Amino acid sequence: MKVDINFEAKNSSNYSVYIDALTSLNLSGKVAIITNPKVSGLHLKSLLEKITADELYIITIADGESYKNQESIDLILENLFNHKFNRGSTLIAFGGGVIGDMTGFVASIYQRGIDFIQVPTTLLSQVDASVGGKTGINNKFGKNLIGAFHQPQAVYIQTDFLKSLPSREFGAGVAEIVKMAVTFDLEFFEWLEEADLRKISDLQLSIKKSVETKAWVVAQDEKEKGLRAVLNYGHTFAHVVENLTDYKKYLHGEAVSIGICMANDLAVKLDLLSSSQSQRIKNILASYDLPTTYEIKDVNAFYNHFFLDKKADDTKIKFILAKGLGDHQMRDDIDKEIVLSVLKEYSV
């Protein structure tokens, strides 16, 4: 299966997403595979059997969201400089969203930009993070506040890599699938209510539908000036949850699941979503053992964290909300007291 991403902007580079189609990858020049110890131990041998290159290097960095920082970027850059990589070199992101974000960021800044290829190994990165060219790292102020838009040369999704994926990681990917169905595709959402993504046939179809949805959005709005912001449904709340828990308690998709539920509660208060529709969304999330609630210790502190989000300015917070099932609404005019009333429902 293949999904093409064809940008409307003439100065953007089109590319394709291949699903279960990686048989061989022949690359010229110097190539570095960026990965982590867990993925390397499980799958590196399999990937190496498919790659030929003039010079091939492996750069391994620590695993986890807490390592998505400048220190890890410096480690990768140092390796590239030591091996004298140039503008004709290629990086391969081999791992989940953390690896993909950091590899893409390094590719965007090394000698002002070199090629990179995404080979995502988690469900979340396969359906969302590997597609669209968002790259970046976290800092003490928030998530992905340092980064760049830098599109990959290609994306290769192999569902075989998911066989070793822990159930929590699998569920984290499901949250991103649900996100796209709720905001863009009622038919896809209704299919998800009946599907079992643990079955390979259903899983492959859900990946294809998710990639097609994201490709359609990104092609129209590469730099997130409008429509693409809808893909942040649930993320405004999720990023606060992640930041307040030091990126250690929840996987990104688990935080997104919580954020979706919080956003839905806000949408219900605004009469954009019915309580029954909100419950249907929550039922899908819960069926994959995703968290749907969170204990807020300080409501005002939680609210103030919204202003560290990339989508906020000094006075307004942009919320992405479900408008029924299969549609969306972006709002930056919601009264603070209404938002606080939602947060109070989650307070300890």
Image (spheres, rainbow, N blue to C red):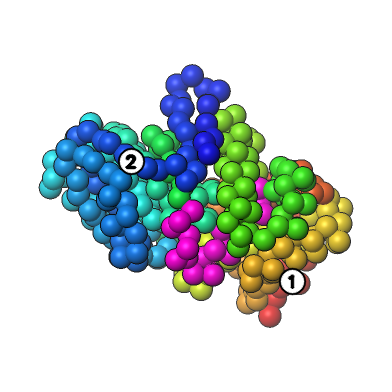
**Which residue is outermost to the bottom?**
348
Residue 293: x and y in percent read: 68, 72
Image point 57% across, 36% down: which residue? 215
Give the dominant element type of the magenta stretch: helix, strand or loop: helix
**Which range is magenta?**
159-180
Compared with 343, 16 (above or below) is above
Residue occupied by mark 2: 24
**Can you tell which mark lies on residue 286?**
none
Question: Disc 1 residue type?
Answer: Lys
Residues at circles 2 and 1 in contact by the CB criterion of under 8 Å? no
Secondary structure at badge 1 equals: helix
Q: Nearer the viewer, residue 76 or 265?
A: 76
Sequence order check, earlier mark of 2 and 1: 2
Q: Position of residue 121 (x, y in %)?
A: 43, 55
In the picture, residue 83 is in which quadrant?
A: top left
Which residue bears the numbered disc 1? 344
At a point 70% along the width and 57% down the height, the residue shown is: 195
Q: Is residue 126 visible?
A: yes
In percent of width and height, residue 341 lies at: 78, 66
The quadrant where residue 135 appears: top left
Element under disc 2: loop
For marks 2 and 1, give the one nearer the viewer: 2
| Residue 90 rendering spot, x and y as whole percentages | 27, 38
Question: Does 151 sit left or right of 172 as displayed?
Answer: left
Mark 2: which amino acid? Ser
Q: CA distance from mark 2 to mark 1?
A: 53 Å
In the image, 99 versus 144, the foreground residue is 99
